[in-house]
Image (spheres, helix red, strand yellow):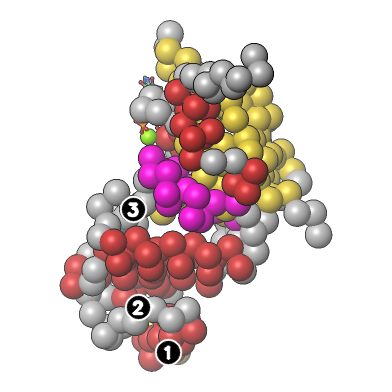
């Protein structure tokens, strides 16, 4: 199978007179974690929104799973297996874990023509998926509002894996999390990667990026200015690429 999952070629986005991103090329392989780095206003969120269908590019080519795509909405992206994960936003607080897990995919059987929700079966599936993923939740009948941010994120990611997702996009997912929750979220991302799913993660935290990413893509003023394998670089070099400063001159020149 082709390892390449996503390929962007010459993607640009303008808002009136403002060019948010310009001629961006980006490729992401299955089972790869790519950290998207750059200073405030570099164009990361704009690029992420284009990838997840929330914004349409002004020009450029978007290939996913080997075919040209034109996404008109996040729903189009979802259908391709692209999910954008924010900390709390796509979990419904006032319904339980099972309802969140099956959101829009409820199991219904018709009995004498009357649709009946298969609650026991849905509960069983949810429990078994979360158990296998090592996510501990007191009860799947609990409303999501009583769970921690980390538990909600785990439900979101596991739901995505279970329904056949191929690419997860995370924009600053750890901003509101505590140390232990960040550690668990990083474990969840490793778990997702081991299933062959690709991950794009936007972060300002260099140590998180170095801990989780296979590759780092750096943006500056709307362009990609660096694309390096994590094992071949250092935090110092990444900071230099982000800020556009030159390395200190060595004694040889
Ligand atoms: N809807 C919009 N209308 C006009 N300009 C926009 C819009 N969205 C983004 N921009 C501009 O595009 C540029 C890139 O913004 P973007 O949000 O992608 O940056 P970012 O890299 O995510 O920054 P941060 O790290 O602060 O989140 C900025 O100059 C921003 O002002
Ligand atoms: Mg942003």
Q: Is residue 160 left or right of residue 59?
A: left
How far apart are the alpha carbons under marks 2 and 3? 24 Å
- Residue at which label 3 appears: 174
Sequence-earlier tag: 1 or 3: 1
Residue sitting at the far right: 1
Q: Give the image quadrant in which the ligand numbered 2 is located.
A: top left
- What's the residue at 42%, 49% (across, down)? 207
- What's the residue at 56%, 18% (across, down)? 249
Quarter placement of the N terminus: bottom right
Is disc 2 in contact with disc 1, using a CB cutoff of under 8 Å?
no
User: Vertically, is 6 above or below 3?
Assistant: above
Q: Position of residue 66 (x, y in %)?
A: 76, 46
- Residue at which label 1 appears: 124
- The answer, for residue 124, to whether it is visible in the render is yes
SS type, badge 1? helix
Q: Is residue 12 magenta?
A: no
In which quadrant of the rendered view does residue 127 lie? bottom left
Q: From the image, state whether disc 1 or disc 3 is nearer to you.
A: 3
Sequence-earlier tag: 2 or 1: 2
Residue sitting at the far front: 251
């Amino acid at each position: 199978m082709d390892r390449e999952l996503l390929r962007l070629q010459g993607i640009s986005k303008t808002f009136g007179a403002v060019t948010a991103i310009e001629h961006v090329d980006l490729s992401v392989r299955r089972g790869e974690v790519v950290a998207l780095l750059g200073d405030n206003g570099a164009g990361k969120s704009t690029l992420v929104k284009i990838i997840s269908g929330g914004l349409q590019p002004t020009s450029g080519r978007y290939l996913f799973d080997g075919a040209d795509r034109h996404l008109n909405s996040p729903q189009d992206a979802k259908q391709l297996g692209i999910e954008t994960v924010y900390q709390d936003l796509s979990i419904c607080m006032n319904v339980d874990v099972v309802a969140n897990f099956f959101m829009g995919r409820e199991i219904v059987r018709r009995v004498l023509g009357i649709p009946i929700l298969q609650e026991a079966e849905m509960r069983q599936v949810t429990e078994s998926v979360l158990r296998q993923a090592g996510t501990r939740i007191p009860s799947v009948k609990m409303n999501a509002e009583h769970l921690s941010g980390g538990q909600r994120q785990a439900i979101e990611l596991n739901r995505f894996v279970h329904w056949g997702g191929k690419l997860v996009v995370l924009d600053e997912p750890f901003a509101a999390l505590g140390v232990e929750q960040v550690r668990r979220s990083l474990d969840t991302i490793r778990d997702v990667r081991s299933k062959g799913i690709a991950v794009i993660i936007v972060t300002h935290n260099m140590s998180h990026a170095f801990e989780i990413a296979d590759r780092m893509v750096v943006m500056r003023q709307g362009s990609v200015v660096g694309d390096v394998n994590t094992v071949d670089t250092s935090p110092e070099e990444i900071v230099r690429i982000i800020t556009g400063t030159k390395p200190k001159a060595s004694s040889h020149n």
